[in-house]
Structure formats: structure tokens, C-alpha cells
Amino acid sequence: MLSLFLASLFGALALMAAAASRGAVSFADRFEDRAKALDNAGRALEYLASRDARERDGVSNPLSEGLPPGVSVRDASSLVNPNWFPPDAFDTPGFSTWFLPGSDAEGFETLRAETGPVLKLGEAYGSFWPRDIAERFLTVWCPWPVNCADLAALERGFALRTGDDEAAARFAQALRERRLAGLKLGFAELQALAGPYWEDLSGVFTTEAPINVNYADPEVLLNLLLWKGFSRPRAQTALESLLKIRSSRTVVESEIPSVLGLGEGDPLLSFVGDTTLAWEVTARSGGETLLVRCLRLYQRGGAGGDLFADAEGNPRLVEIHREWL
């Protein structure tokens, strides 16, 4: 009996030792995979920061040529940001189909007014959109465009960033007056309106159009056209024209009105442009996946040159969030 007991004991100890050894190897592999993912993500960010924004972002200036192996990049600014997106858009054909049964634009607007801007999309709005819709179309990690974002959201965002409710109200009113007059806010005007709070708002508020027509999901583009009054056949024709062009070359901002059939000064032109303002970088190595989100601080400055860019036109890139998936 004693020999049987000792044999069982030593057998169990041997199994435990083997398991510990496997665990050590697994930990070492995981550590190595994470190190590789971190390194590749860093190299990808360096590459993105080196891209000349004046060449715009699209087929003519492809991303894949400079990315390390195991890294993919997504244009995050061309997604829909519930923190600032006009709530009435969610009550139109297209966007309204994203909601879960029992949820609607009115309920979303009510909740957003209560919560304000959020960073955890799933926790805040998980009852409004299914996970696959949220992952494909939505983000909270991108700049706020002052020429098209919801005014109430902009006012609240201004107040949260600065702590000055009165200045926020004046800022929103100035934007409202410009929109009623059919005017877009330029960069110099944005700086002037921000006044002493420019440093607090810089990189968060932008006068650039948020959605790059060269990378935006076709469904987002179609829904924008439907929201702005296009019939479905007209919207589908305009979208097909755009997709055909962008598959062979980059669509630049000056030709967007003619490609989409928009008149001069159409409000939709405040939403769509040719430059990406936020990137999501996903680096994979072995069983490890790192997601890095960054803002591309780029602003066309007109005759004075591009702002937030160096002499070669390369925009500043600022990491704002990272997580292991």
C-alpha cells in the first residue's frame, strides 16, 4: 500500500511539474508575443505619422505599403460617433435600422442628454445597438467637427473641457448663427471663438470634415445621403459612382460635390472630406492582440499653410487609448 501511495504521490508531483513547465513556456511565449505586438504597433504609428497629409488618404496613397506584418489599420474618424452625431439622423431610413428592437432615436437622445459624452460605448449604449453594429459602425474615439456636430453636444463638450458654462453657451450660439447663415467655421475663427480655452479644445474640436469618403463604410455613406433627403435610387447611384472612383484612385475634397451630386454649400459637405483624422491600429502576434487608438492632429490652414503639421506636411499623431483584446 505504501509503495502504491508513493507511486501515486510522485506521479502527481510529476504531472504538477509538467504543468508548471508548460505554464512557464506559455508565459514566456505570451510575453514574447506581447513584445512583438507592441513593437509592431509602435512602428505602425511612426509610419502613420510620417504620411504626408497633402497626398490625402485613399487608393492613391495606400496604407499597406508601410505597415509591419501582423498589423491592420482602420479609419476611425469615418465611423459614427454617438457622442456628437446629430440625433435626428438616427431617426431616418438607414441609421434607424441599426437600433435593437425597442430602442429608437428619441430614447438615445434622452439618454445622451442625461449622460453626456461617454468613453465606454458598450456600457453606455449597449441597449441601443447590437455588438456587431457597434463594432462595425460606431466609435467614441475621434475628434468633434464643429461644422456638423450636434450643437447641444458641442456646448456640453466645451463646458466639460473648460468648466465654463457661459463660454460654452456663447460658443454654441456663435456656431448656430453661422449655420443659419450657411457659413462654415474656419480654423482661425475656431481659435478665436475658443479664446483662452484653445489649449483645452485643440485636438478635440476640428473644422475638418470627419468622414473620409475614400475609407468610409458604404453603408455609412448611403445612410448619410438618405438622411439628407436623397431618394434611395438617387443615393444608390451616387454611392456607386463614388465607390467606382475610389477603387482606382483617391477622391479629393474638391470633386466630392460633383461625384455625389451635391450643390455648393450643401450641409452634407461638412461631414465628408478626403482626410482621416483618427486611426485604429491593431497589432497581432501569436495569441496576443493590441488595439491602439490615435488622433491625427491635422488642420488645413489656407494661405498660411497647414497647421498641426511639420514643414513636410506630416500631421502630429497622438495616442489616446490602448487595450489588449
Image (spheres, grey):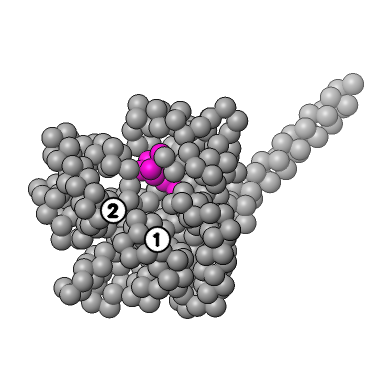
Residue 11 at x, y percent in the picture: 80, 34
CB atoms of marks 1 and 2 within 8 Å:
no
Three-letter code, disc 2: Asn
Three-letter code, disc 1: Val
Residue 270 at x, y percent in the picture: 34, 57
Q: Residue at x 18, y 39 (%)?
A: 168
Report how far apart the C-alphas of labels 1 and 2 lie in the structure.
Answer: 11 Å
> According to the image, label 1 marks what residue?
272
Q: Nearer the viewer, residue 49 or 8?
A: 49
Q: Nearer the viewer, residue 87 or 139?
A: 87
Q: Residue at x 65, y 44 (%)?
A: 23
User: On the rendered structure, is 105 left or right of 101?
Assistant: left
In which quarter of the view is residue 43 placed? bottom left
Residue 101 at x, y percent in the picture: 60, 30
In which quarter of the view is residue 151 placed? top left
Q: Is residue 49 above or below residue 152?
A: below
Residue 89 at x, y percent in the picture: 44, 43
| Residue 124 seen in render | no
Which portion, as a residue range, is magenta? 80-87
What SS does tag 2 mark?
loop
What SS does tag 1 mark?
strand
Q: Residue at x 11, y 54 (%)?
A: 192
Q: Nearer the viewer, residue 112 or 143?
A: 112
Within 10 Å of disc 2 (Cα), the crowding (few <14, some 14-19, many 20+) is many
> According to the image, label 2 marks what residue?
147
Residue 28 in magenta?
no
- Judged by its main secondary structure, the magenta piece is loop
In which quarter of the view is residue 18 placed? top right
Q: Earlier in the sequence, mark 1 or mark 2?
A: 2
Q: Is residue 86 above or below residue 100?
A: below
